[in-house]
Amino acid sequence: TQSCDIYFYDLAFKMGVDQMSKYLGDFGFGKNTALDISEARDGLLPTREWKRALKGRAWYPGDSLNMGIGQGFMLSTPLQLATATAVMANRGRWVQPALLKSVTGNNDSIRQRKVTMEDVQIKNLDDWDYIISAMEEVMHGKRGTARGSGRRASYRMAGKTGTAQVVGIKQGEKYDAKALSERNRDHALFVGFAPVHNPQIAVAVIVENGGGGSTSAAPIGRAMFDEWILNLNAVSEVTVEK
């Protein structure tokens, strides 16, 4: 909810690269899972074997800490972020992303590729509620990083803000956007879905060199939610009794 890197450093250290790579792969990272977008990139989901083969070096605990916040060797596309967010909203159920809504007739220029991905299985199903509740607090909680974008909404949404570092910062130095050229400033990120209890839409937003996800990317996500839910579909939120 408060985007605390230290929590994820500790979690990544305890999990290790093998566990992280396994579960991130289940959510579609490191793969092109798109149905009709053959040009989509695979991204990079690092493993200890990958580092040994490519760089000839062992995997270190510090690599896991970097990976725990999406830095280091890991690379992801916005489509992968949106797809993983949809899997989260569906509580593990996979829906393969596609650019086209449907294809009729015989059109050889459109090549569809079915990628078989199993639904994500977890031991404790309450964990879905836990993480989704935390993402809901991002948008609606008193200390949520995107609470400004969730304010005065007629429905509940879940999200996560972030930044993608463009250039390295030397040890002991602090990030200063004003001291960098615009093209070297952080990218702003936001992922989310809505409504929380009856998900209809999942999004990933990247604002190149936009800085903080809460100020630049999250408002765009909110605008997309509003347009889809309030204007295009007029979907009313369904309250799920627990």
Image: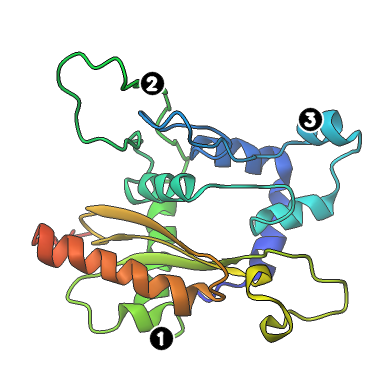
Q: Secondary structure at mark 2?
A: loop
**Disc 2 from disc 3: Cα separation:** 28 Å
**Does 44 sit left or right of 73 as displayed?**
left
Q: Which residue is mark 2?
A: 113
Determine whether 100 is above or below 68 in the image.
above
Residue at screen point 82% across, 55% down = 62
Q: Which labelled disc corresponds to residue 105?
A: none
Q: Nearer the viewer, mark 1 or mark 2?
A: 2
Determine whether 61 is above or below 59 in the image.
below
Q: Amino acid at mark 3?
A: Glu
Residue at screen point 38% across, 41% down = 92
- Of 10 and 241, nearer the camera is 10
Q: Which residue is mark 1?
A: 142
First along the sequence among labels 2 and 3? 3
| Mark 3 closeness class: few <14, some 14–19, many ≥20 residues within 10 Å | some
Residue at screen point 53% across, 73% down = 210
Q: Nearer the viewer, mark 2 or mark 3?
A: 2
Q: Which residue is mark 3?
A: 49
| Mark 2 closeness class: few <14, some 14–19, many ≥20 residues within 10 Å | few
- Of 84 and 196, nearer the camera is 84
Question: Can you give x and y, in whole percent of width and height, for residue 160 in the image?
Answer: 46, 66
**Disc 1 from disc 3: Cα separation:** 43 Å
**Does 161 sit left or right of 87 as displayed?**
right
- Of 84 and 209, nearer the camera is 209
